[in-house]
């Protein structure tokens, strides 16, 4: 079982939220499908077994993320990170991280694909850029060695700006783009 991957994903999502929307102390709800949780934890649990696994996980991350509340309806899980966990993530964020640079860049009016790719290359010289032609998005971009992160960035170039969505490797592959 790889609990570190799930914890890091939760932290990554909280950082992205805080960078996009601003920091606000208070609880945050993250929703995960069972398949994603099984990918992160490298398990093959059904919903009831996953509930038990997540309660154990919550005990191990309590010092950093606070007391998590965990619930599910069918195969959709809700993990509630309390104020203490949100504050922990904010206090430990790096203002010069790739994510901070990317969000600042795409938030700039007139942002271009070149501007976005420059942020990738600023953080690594091992960047995969692939033009795709299926109509869902325009480019697939990621760090070939998983540093600084292993997300798959799906980039769309629009008239006056660029947007992105990011997925874990497993979730991206599951979509079958």
Image (cartoon, grey):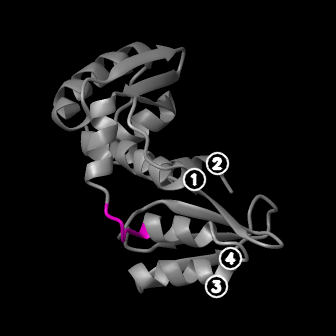
Q: Which residue occupies the foreground of this view, 100 or 168? A: 100
Rendered position, 60 above or below 104: above
Kindly indicate the quadrant of the structure image that contains residue 10: top left
Secondary structure that dominates the magenta span: loop
The disc label shown at residue 114, or none: 3
Crowd class of label 3 (few under 14; some 14 to 19; many from 20; radius 10 Å):
few
The reply to whether the C-beta atoms of the residues labelled 3 and 1 are less than 8 Å apart is no
Crowd class of label 1 (few under 14; some 14 to 19; many from 20; radius 10 Å):
some
The disc label shown at residue 136, or none: none
Q: Is residue 24 left or right of residue 55?
A: right
In the rendered structure, which segment of residues is drawn in magenta? 94-98
Helix, strand or loop at label 4? It is: loop
Mark before the other along the chain sequence, 1 or 4: 4
Kindly indicate the quadrant of the structure image that contains residue 123: bottom left
Q: Which residue has dot 4 on it?
A: 111
Q: Please name the residue shown 43% across and 16% down the image.
A: 71
| Front: mark 3 or 4 | 4
In the rendering, at what x and y percent does residue 156 appear?
73, 66
Mark 1 vs mark 4, CA separation in Å: 25 Å
Crowd class of label 4 (few under 14; some 14 to 19; many from 20; radius 10 Å):
some
The answer to whether residue 42 shows anywhere in this view is no
Q: Which residue has dot 2 on it?
A: 175
In the rendering, at what x and y percent does residue 152 appear?
53, 61
Q: Please name the residue shown 54% across and 54% down the image.
A: 20
Mark 1 vs mark 2, CA separation in Å: 5 Å
Helix, strand or loop at label 1? It is: helix
Q: Is residue 153 magenta?
A: no
Q: Which residue has dot 1 on it?
A: 172
The reply to whether the C-beta atoms of the residues labelled 3 and 4 are less than 8 Å apart is no
| Front: mark 2 or 4 | 4
The reply to whether the C-beta atoms of the residues labelled 1 and 2 are less than 8 Å apart is yes
């Amino acid at each position: 079982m790889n609990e570190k991957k799930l914890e890091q994903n939760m932290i990554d999502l909280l950082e992205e939220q805080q960078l996009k929307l601003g920091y606000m102390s208070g609880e945050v709800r993250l929703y995960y499908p069972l398949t994603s949780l099984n990918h992160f934890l490298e398990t093959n649990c059904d919903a009831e077994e996953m509930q038990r696994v997540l309660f154990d996980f919550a005990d191990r991350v309590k010092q950093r993320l606070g007391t998590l509340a965990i619930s599910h309806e069918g195969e959709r899980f809700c993990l509630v990170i309390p104020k203490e966990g949100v504050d922990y993530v904010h206090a430990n964020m790096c203002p010069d991280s790739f994510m901070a640079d990317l969000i600042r860049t795409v938030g700039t009016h007139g942002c271009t694909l070149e501007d976005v790719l420059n942020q990738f290359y600023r953080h690594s010289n091992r960047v995969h850029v692939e033009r795709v032609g299926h109509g869902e998005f325009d480019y697939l971009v990621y760090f070939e060695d998983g540093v600084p992160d292993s997300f798959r960035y799906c980039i769309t170039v629009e008239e006056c700006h660029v947007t992105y969505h990011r997925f874990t490797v497993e979730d991206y592959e599951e979509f079958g783009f």
